[in-house]
Amino acid sequence: MPISRNSFDSPDYFLRTLGTWWATFFGDRTTVRSMIACAGEMYYQTYIDFLDAIASASKFEIPLFQTKNWHPFTVLASERFTTSQLNNLYGTSQLTYKNALIPAYGDKERSNYFSYRIPENVKEVNAIYNRLLDPSLIMMDNLDFAVDADRHAIHFASDPFENPLVPKRDVLNDRGEVVDQEILLWFNMSQWDHDYIFNQFGYVVKIWMKTSSFYKDFVSAVWDHLTLGPTKATLKLALMAMTGVRFAIDQEVVSDIIYDSDSVHVVTPLNLYTFPSTTTLLVAVGDTIRPGDPLCDAVLIIEPSQTTDWSSVRGVAVGDAMLRMGGVRNPITFENMDTELEYLGIDQAGKAVVQFSVSGFPQDVAEFWRQSHAEGINLGLTLAEALDTRKTKVGQPLPQDLPQTINPFEFVMDNLFSNNLFVILMKPEQFAQGAPGLQGLEYLYKYLTPQTTYMIFIEMNQGEEYYSVGDSEDTLAFQKSVDPITDTTEHLYKDFGPSIKRIKENCR
């Protein structure tokens, strides 16, 4: 006989499994039905746990949370949160760093709800009953209450202690005096976080993140790196899990693009891809896309080549771990701008010496150029010889044989990194809500193709700063520019920021 959720809710179903005598001829069938109904609730929890155990064998099917059919919830009236206990937390939605009408990190939460603490690993509750059998009160999620998993609290629209249908009892002290009150409610189909993914798969690769479908997919991608080998395909799977920005899944044709208030949807006959409305799409209706193709510019993987367009990148800072030059302790920055090529003459070895502008500490820059020229001599090709524009290269190049300007960034990317480095362009503002984001980058480098590394370019959009002129408040927006912006005003002004506050969660 097939088993379903309805089977455990049906006493008649269990009566039939006991046999015809109990189901038809036994005189006190009502009592038997009541006993079986209570037992069925316990059996259903066993059934749920059994299915979870089976699913946990697969990194694709493992559940995020444990489902509890029923769980008793008791709380004291004295445990109600006050407004001062509900600070805004880092990482929650619709919070900002700027002084605006939207609440900021560290501000006190303005709440009209009746809030109480719940166990830390409770993530969702489907409904709340005042008793298990024949309940007279049912409260529904997002209507009568809401679970705040970040603050480990539950917010009720009305105070349950004032509801006459909620079971309650007085709490007495040693002298028999009433000092508090306690209520009992029942969570139905609640979700509990027991770190299933980490305990089953994540611990092997030493990756722990907050439990989510993104974390599950990220661990799965890392396992693919280990079992299938590090490939561009598995890297894209990891990036999709980190950011929530999806690449194309199948070979398909874009049939429609739909915009709404906060999202844009790329529609194909096989899939639906959703991105924030501010995302710049790279596809149009009628385009054919293939598995792994980027659909927007929120996450792009670029393999450096002579034809790569680097116009959107400001420059790159290369550290000592990649330079591998003794004595160069700090990064050398190669800016994406044309700079004059400087001809320094002929050295003692008879080689032409040229340099171009790079940024860094003066002693590091001097040591970088000294070692670069020495290495060029050892390899039989100095920088001047590599830049020689003559068709017939006889002797050392003179100033007229060399280009007048050079772009340091493009030269480094096209000549030094073209075969062993790829670039990832990322826009965190367009990541999906709840995605791990940039914290996943620290795990990726362990699973790269041998002799290969990656470079991350992250677009950071400046926000707004606020200042006061007289009795009015104006907004000063900082523009993206190499040179600092200076301005003057005839009025005295008061600066409102920046301010430093403690937050209860790590910034990653």
Image (tube, rainbow, N blue to C red):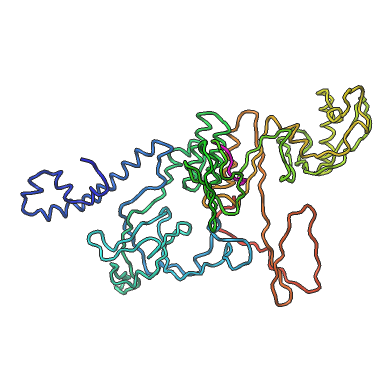
**Outermost residue toward the bottom?**
471
Q: Is residue 135 left or right of residue 481?
A: left
Q: Is residue 86 left or right of residue 305?
A: left
**239 or 327: which is nearer to us?**
239
Q: Which span is picked out in magenta?
A: 291-298
Q: Position of residue 428 (x, y in %)?
A: 61, 50
The relative height of residue 478 versus residue 8 in the rendered view (above or below) is below
Q: Position of residue 121 (x, y in %)?
A: 42, 53
296 within the magenta span: yes
**222 or 427: which is nearer to us?**
427
Q: Position of residue 1 (x, y in %)?
A: 20, 40
Q: Residue at x 56, y 31 (%)?
A: 230
Q: Position of residue 463 (x, y in %)?
A: 67, 59
Magenta span dominant secondary structure: loop
The relative height of residue 473 versus residue 185 in the rendered view (above or below) is below
Q: Is residue 317 left or right of residue 339?
A: left
- Quadrant hosting residue 360: top right
**67 or 259: which is nearer to us?**
259
Q: Residue at x 74, y 73 (%)?
A: 469
- Quadrant hosting residue 363: top right
* Number of on-image labels: 0
